[in-house]
Image (cartoon, helix red, strand yellow):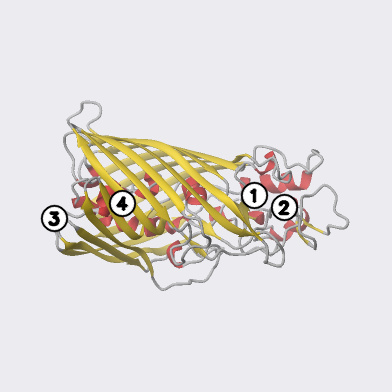
Amino acid sequence: MHVNRKLIATAFAAAGLSSAGASHATNWVMAYGTEPATSTHRLLGAVQITYENNFDCTEPDNLQGGAKVNNGGVVNNCRQGPELRDDESGLALQNLMLGARGNLIPGRINYFVAANAGQNSANYHPYKTERDYLASLVGASVSFHYIPGVRVRAGLQQKPGPEEIYQGLEATDYIFLTDFVQRVQIERFIDGNAKGTVAIPGQGYGYQGTLVNPTTASGVGPITGNVSRWGYDVDVGRDWGVQFFDAFKRDKWTHTYSVMFANGNGIHRGDNNSEKDLNLYLSSEYDLPGGKGPLKHGVKLYGYHQQGVRNFVIDASGTESQDFDRIRYGIGAKAIGHLFGEDRGKHRLAFELMFAEGMINYTPTANMADAAYGGLVQFAAEEGNKAKGLTLDYGYYLNKRWQFDVRYSRDNLLYETDDSTPYWTSGDERVLTYTTLGVNYYFAPKTRLTFNYEFRKAEAPNPALNLDGTVNPSATINANEITGSVGDRVGLRLTHSF
């Protein structure tokens, strides 16, 4: 039911570390792509050490059919770290990042470059237990400022999108990503699909991951081949491409746009087809007095749309492939400052509503990436397969030391499915609702300790169905057994940046 782990946060956040001193501190488009004319060259970096404990999870003990060999295993939601091992708790060097940024020609050309050697998804292929890279580039771009109203940035850079993964590290208040962003928005790349888009002859995994023989099977979905137990790359909220952007100030409002053409592949790869992703972003921010850096007071409204094409193997021999659309879009608002007329303390209010169509990362079968039974990656590839996410966030800054946070998030996974593929049914829907309580204590402006307690509820709201519309009892039990094993978790993270 869940996919790779939460420690991807550091890789996508790294490039925002130096934004605290930018003139447009909460305007991430400008903070990432511009430099003050007086700036020369400067180093930046971060170290994050994180402890995670999925203490309230249980081990499935009532799985049915072939999946019963996984009884006693640990589902992916309850594993610690980017390595999908059976550890439910542990300590990780989540982020070890070093970079530089500055001007090549002041006011005309600036650059950004950063590499991350931490234990995060930038250095692991999805679902694998071994590390693939000692360190990975998480930023390598140059910006040109010659045309009034049209700045140009080229290279590996952040894709404009949801605030949760677009904002810089110093504005990231929580340890764990919301489920929608972690699962659906951040993209993992695989060659073939365990769910498949056409029936493939031969023995394999059918509907709800049941191992069947297609010559005798009854009431199960198509059999799929050329399946993969791990992916070949991840985007960590970034892509290689060219971005056109700028911001325009009107009285107390700042209006910003971004148009980015990108490869639509992982951070270690070039393009995988002739198509280019199109990423669009608009924001309007109203300035409020007070604050500085990422905590500059203001109210921001924003919206984004991302669309691209993914080439996906759909036959057992690996010779036949098909293009599928991947669409993501959403709107949001964020406000920070003395919002209720108080002199002491300040508040943060945030809202995001996010949607996904096609290429939705559903789960490894049986929700265990390295399981004895299943462990094959599943994507709902067709555009008619949809997910949506909601995030509500509140923060209270008591003083320069103490910050208190609460966040509610909901992921409606596959709430709507593609009618042309009958083996996608309402039984595949999952609803994941998380409520996170957090405390940040700042030893210094660049050094803080973060504590999170996350209440998690995962549900399979509908029974699993056979193709004839009747209930599949075993598959229904398995879905409820897996979702019911997900419990609460706590995290503690020490962050130092410079």
Query: Quick one: label 1 or label 4, which is nearer the N terminus?
Result: 4
In this orientation, which residue lies closer to the viewer: 121 or 58?
Answer: 121
Residue located 71% across and 67% down the image: 317
Whether label 2 touches label 1, CB < 8 Å: yes
Calculate the distance from the C-alpha at mark 2 to the C-alpha at mark 4: 42 Å
**Closer to the observer: label 3 or label 1?**
3
Query: Quick one: label 3 or label 4, which is nearer the N terminus?
Result: 3
In this orientation, which residue lies closer to the viewer: 453 or 112?
Answer: 112
Three-letter residue code for mark 3: Ala
Q: Label 3: which residue?
A: 37
Three-letter residue code for mark 2: Leu
Residue located 79% across and 38% down the image: 469
Calculate the distance from the C-alpha at mark 3 to the C-alpha at mark 4: 21 Å
Give the label on residue 168, or none.
4
Calculate the distance from the C-alpha at mark 2 to the C-alpha at mark 1: 8 Å
Q: Residues within 10 Å of mark 4 (few under 14, many from 20)?
A: many
Calculate the distance from the C-alpha at mark 1 to the C-alpha at mark 4: 34 Å
- At mark 4, the secondary structure is loop
Query: Quick one: label 2 or label 1, which is nearer the N terminus?
Result: 2
Whether label 2 touches label 4, CB < 8 Å: no
Residue 446 shows up from this direction: no
- At mark 2, the secondary structure is loop
Query: Quick one: label 3 or label 2, which is nearer the N terminus?
Result: 3
Q: Label 2: which residue?
A: 63
